Structures are given as structure tokens and as C-alpha cells.
Image: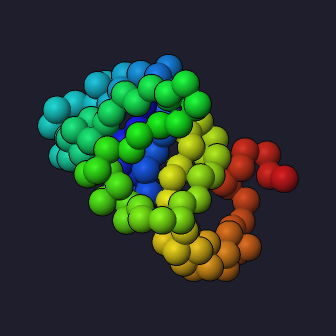
Amino acid sequence: MITKGQERCLYVFPVSEFARIASQLREQPMTHKAARAYSRVFFASAHDEVPDKQGRVTIPAHLREYAGLDRELVVIGASTRVEIWDRQAWDTYLAESEEDFAGIEEGVLPGGL
């Protein structure tokens, strides 16, 4: 499953992981405004893309536009998903995030490193 991600990238999930997230979102009360907003964007932009015989996947035009995908892409592993970024957007994000990453204290990883 491919859908809009945060920071203008695309998220790619195995069907089982997408179903797990969908289940968690369904458990949120309809009165939770942020959950409603997230669900709308997350599900409205989701596409079930099946790789062709050569393992290639077509990215729908509206998702390419959302993520600013043009010529050079970066595909990264992010735990239970893959993210697809425009090369320049990824380089900018990474440069801006390096200092934050270096300064992250305990609490992000259970038990520390």
C-alpha cells in the first residue's frame, strides 16, 4: 500500500502493516478531531499497487505531485514501512535533522543504546 506520508514523502506499507494501522485508527473515537483529519488524508490517498513482472511499481500522479517526485528519488527503510523521497527534499531534511538526531537523549529507545 502506498499513501501520503508526513514531511512530503510517500509511505509504502506491506498490506498486513497497513491493516494494523487501519485497525488502530478505527479504534480512535470519531470525536477525536486529529484522528479524523489524519484518517481522511491517510486513507483517501492510499493505493494498492502491485509490482509488475520486473518488480516495478507505478506511483499515481497525485502522489508523485504531493511528494515532489521528479527525476531523482531516495528510498529509505523506516522500521515497518519504506519511504520514498525526492532526492533534494531528502538531502534537505537530513541536513536539517542531523543536529536533532545527534542531540536526542534517552527516552526515544527503550533501555537506551
Q: Nearer the viewer, residue 112 or 37?
A: 37
Q: Quadrant of residue 53?
A: top right
Left or right: 45, with 98 as reference point: left
Residue shown at the point (53%, 49%) measured from the top left: 83
Q: Position of residue 62 (x, y in %)?
A: 26, 51
**In front: 92, or 52?**
52
Residue at 84% in and 53% down: 113
Q: Is residue 7 above or below residue 22?
A: below
Question: What percent of the width, then of the height, locates residue 82?
Answer: 56, 43
Q: Quadrant of residue 21?
A: top left
Residue 35 seen anywhere in this rendered image of the structure: no
Which of 79 and 47 lies nearest the eye of the viewer?
A: 47
* Residue 1 at x, y percent in the picture: 42, 31
Q: Is residue 34 positioned above or below 50 on the image?
A: below
Left or right: 16 with respect to 105?
left
Q: Is residue 110 visible?
A: yes
- Which residue is pictured at 41% across the width and 62% down the height? 69
Left-right relation of 72 to 44: right
Q: Residue drawn 39% across and 44% down?
A: 59
